[in-house]
Amino acid sequence: DAKTTQPPSMDCAEGRAANLPCNHSTISGNEYVYWYRQIHSQGPQYIIHGLKNNETNEMASLIITEDRKSSTLILPHATLRDTAVYYCIVRVENAGGTSYGKLTFGQGTILTVHP
Amino acid sequence: DAGITQSPRYKITETGRQVTLMCHQTWSHSYMFWYRQDLGHGLRLIYYSAAADITDKGEVPDGYVVSRSKTENFPLTLESATRSQTSVYFCASRRQGAEAFFGQGTRLTVV
């Protein structure tokens, strides 16, 4: 699976949009971009994923560049409860094989939302 | 209740003892995973399983054993616990083509 690069930390004011970048310049055509977050001491929580097109759900939006070498996770109105470590993961979706589906986590971005 | 549960939530054991961490999911997901999380290392994959009776090593498998006799259970055994295995352990499951769901974690201390 392709490696990702994220800034180690970011700050955001409550109520403002948080834009978390991720670089995945070696991504291949069949790899999806996934975002998870981990709030202190809890298990990671799925946020959103995409292949080529931009995606939006009730939690966030995912913007993937046309060349797919980078993406941005957008939390439109950050709250204090969004303070967490955010992980960007790229993963291939094979048709079979035992390596199918495993997630490899990097160091992530520590997002701190302040009042 | 539907979901993924880990037990115990907290465990203290002595060096050299065998300890088993349990993971149970109610969705019949094919894929299950065990991770450990340590300060400075983030989440590291120990073992994963694509289906019952199919398991494979992850990034840090040494000292651990897994089994998957039933789809819903994926126990992780430390055959002879060492202090370096003190960590927080997370289990996860997913179905094909979907996101993974994680348990709440087991905090293991080896003294």
Image (cartoon, coloured by chain):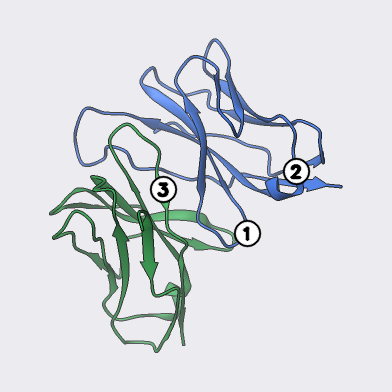
Chain colours: A blue, B green
Instruction: Give the Cα separation between the discs numbered 3 and 2.
Output: 23 Å
Q: Which residue type carries mark 3?
A: Phe
Q: Secondary structure at mark 1?
A: loop
Residue B84 or residue B27, whichever sits in front: B27
Question: Which residue in the structure is indicated by mark 3?
Answer: B101
Question: Which residue in the structure is indicated by mark 1?
Answer: A40
Q: Which residue type carries mark 2?
A: Thr
Image position, residue A59 (x, y; %) = 60, 34
In the displayed image of the protein, which residue is found farthest to the front? B1
Image position, residue B46 (x, y; %) = 35, 58
Chain designation of label 2: A
Question: Which residue in the structure is indicated by mark 2?
Answer: A79
Q: Is residue A103 left or right of residue A4?
A: left
Q: Which residue type carries mark 1?
A: His
Residue at (15% x, 58% y) in the render: B70
In the displayed image of the protein, which residue is found farthest to the top? A66
Q: Secondary structure at mark 2?
A: loop
The reply to whether dot 3 and dot 1 touch (C-beta < 8 Å) is no
Q: Is residue B27 above or below residue A52?
A: below
Residue at (34% x, 42% y) in the render: A102
Image position, residue B87 (x, y; %) = 48, 70
